[in-house]
Image (cartoon, rainbow, N blue to C red):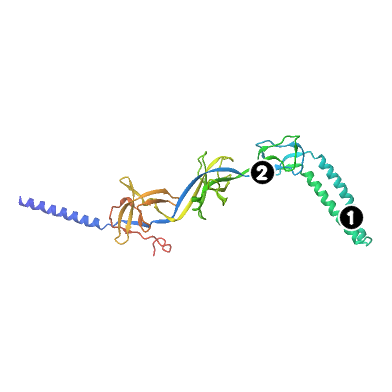
Amino acid sequence: MKHVNWIIVVVIIVIFSGCNQLEEHSEKVIPKVKTQKVSVTSKKIQHEFPGLLKESRNVNLAFRVAGPVQSIKIKEGDFVQKGQLIATIDPRDYQVQYNVAKAEYDKVITETQRVKQLYQKQSVTDVDYQKALAGEKMISEKLNHATNQLNDTKLIAPFSGYIQKINFEVGELINTGMPLATLIDINSFVVECDVPASVLAQINNETQYQVQSNLLNQAPVKVTLINYLKKANSSQLYRFQFELSKNELTRVQAGITVTVLINCQCKNEQQLSVPVEAVFNRNSKPQVWVYNTETSTIQAHEVKTGALLQNGYIEIQKGLKPEDTVVVAGVNNLNHNDTVKVIQPISETNQGGLL
């Protein structure tokens, strides 16, 4: 019986000895982690304003001569190409004017040629020669004027676009400069919005601008700032104008309402962010491991997260300081106050770890 008791005691000693060895072995396993300092940038603030989409050009088409409208070749809503005929004025009087100028021109040119030949033979004086040259110049300008007026009886589209409105009918008398039709260019758009002085003060060279369609729920597209009025209106707002290519925002028409996004960077305010992989959830609360460089230990810090950033980072609104270093890999296998070993990044000159 005593022999059996000794066997039991020996077994217990062996078991406890093995457990102690396992504990000592487990204590020697130090987790390896990757760390990274908290990213600190200027705080970004996005402002939203209602904007109006307008055509890039809106031109009143008018004749440079007066007369009765002979024909109108377009209808409201038609698309016209640059150089296309829009309308004509009865050219009768201008044709007569051209014919008279052409006859006078032919007569003067013939006489001038004769004087030039005589001048080469020294048969006419310098005064007569200069008079002939002046007469040639005058009649040439007169013919050019008559030709231009005859050509101006045809109204040509200065650019490609859509006919928005027609103000006259065939047979009506139209005067010089009176708009016969309105032509709009929607190959590109202008976006207008009003901005308060508080936002104007935040705008700098790093500010980015976007436009989003309210009706089509399309993703925001980048626009270019054209200009803004330097004086506020009666509501203390500044009118901004942006250029938008038609290809950027599809299925939109001039006159619709859009949302203008102004993304400002406030240099006086800091924005903290960490890689998304650094954030983990425990007890339904987002946390990160903060690495203590002096003790090589980690502590869990509860954080308040913000927006996801485009570079794979997430904004940290609360819980970290700019000087903090956080664990960015293997965060789910760690515990509070663990001692860890930081994996040093591979040098660009030691690819493959051969050195």
Query: Is residue 86 placed above or below 280 in the rendered structure?
Result: above
Q: Is residue 127 above or below residue 164?
A: below
Q: CA distance from mark 1 to mark 2?
A: 45 Å
Residue under label 1, please give it: 112
Q: Secondary structure at mark 2?
A: strand
Q: Amino acid at mark 2?
A: Val
Which quadrant of the figure has residue 41? bottom left
Residue at the far left: name it: 1
State which mark lies toward you, 1 or 2. 2
Of residue 284 and residue 202, the one placed in the foreground of this image is 202
Residue 291 horizontal side relative to residue 178, left or right:
left
Residue beneath the point at 89% across and 55% down? 112
Q: Is residue 228 visible?
A: no
Q: Position of residue 246 (x, y in %)?
A: 58, 44
Q: Give the left or right position of residue 299, taking residue 315 as reference.
A: left
Q: Is residue 215 left or right of residue 328?
A: right
Q: Residue at x 88, y 56 (%)?
A: 132
Please give the label number shown on residue 322.
Answer: none
> Amino acid under label 1?
Thr
Which quadrant holds the C terminus?
bottom left
- Estimate the x, y position of residue 230 in percent, counting from the top left: 56, 52
Which class describes the residues within 10 Å of circle 1: few (<14), some (14-19), or many (20+)?
Answer: many
Name the outermost residue toward the front. Answer: 234
Q: Is disc 1 placed on a helix, strand or loop? A: helix
What residue sits right under mark 2 in the picture? Answer: 59
> From this viewpoint, is residue 341 visible?
yes
